[in-house]
Image: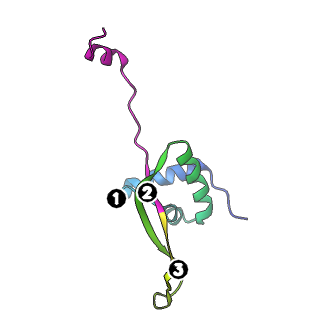
Amino acid sequence: MGQHLPTDAVRDAIERYVERSVEKRFTTADIARFMGVEEYPVRAAVSWLARYGVIEIIPGVRSKRYLEQPANRRLHGDSYSVSMYRIKEKCAEVDFAALNRAFGFA
């Protein structure tokens, strides 16, 4: 059985990874490598983080991965694509008083 990783630990690692990254996006494999752990528990934590709106899949952006085969022995089915994620932007709180003034309701 694989190791358990607290979701908070993965979230913290994602934040540190993105801080250091130029592209500000990541895969579960990137975070697992960054943390020095297996990918499966990272995937589980990422699933929860996406479900609760902390991170999101970048629509239409995929990363190509290869099964572990020597480059000269790769076949058509030896590659697959994975989702790319980003930290979801946080919205500011709505100032209803300012909106009411702007639209003439106050």
- From this view, report whether residue 57 is shown above or below residue 95: below
- The tag on residue 77 is 3
Secondary element type, mark 3:
helix
- Between the residue at mark 1 and the residue at mark 2, the CA separation in whole angstroms equals 10 Å
Q: Which residues are magenta?
A: 83-106
Quadrant assignment for the C terminus: top left
Q: Hey, what amino acid is under mark 3?
A: Gly
Q: Residue furthest right?
A: 1
CA separation, marks 3 and 1? 28 Å
Disc number lying in front (1 or 2): 1
Task: Determine the residue positioned at 58% across, 58% down.
Answer: 43
Looking at the image, tell me whether mark 2 or mark 3 is earlier in sequence order: 2
Tell me: 50 left or right of 91: right
Q: Is residue 72 magenta?
A: no
Q: Is residue 90 above or below residue 56?
A: above
Label 2, residues with CA under 10 Å away: few <14, some 14-19, many ≥20? some
Relative side of 102 to 6, left or right: left
**Sequence order check, earlier mark of 3 and 1:** 1
Q: Residue at x 48, y 53 (%)?
A: 14
Q: Which mark is residue 17?
A: 2
97 inside magenta stretch = yes
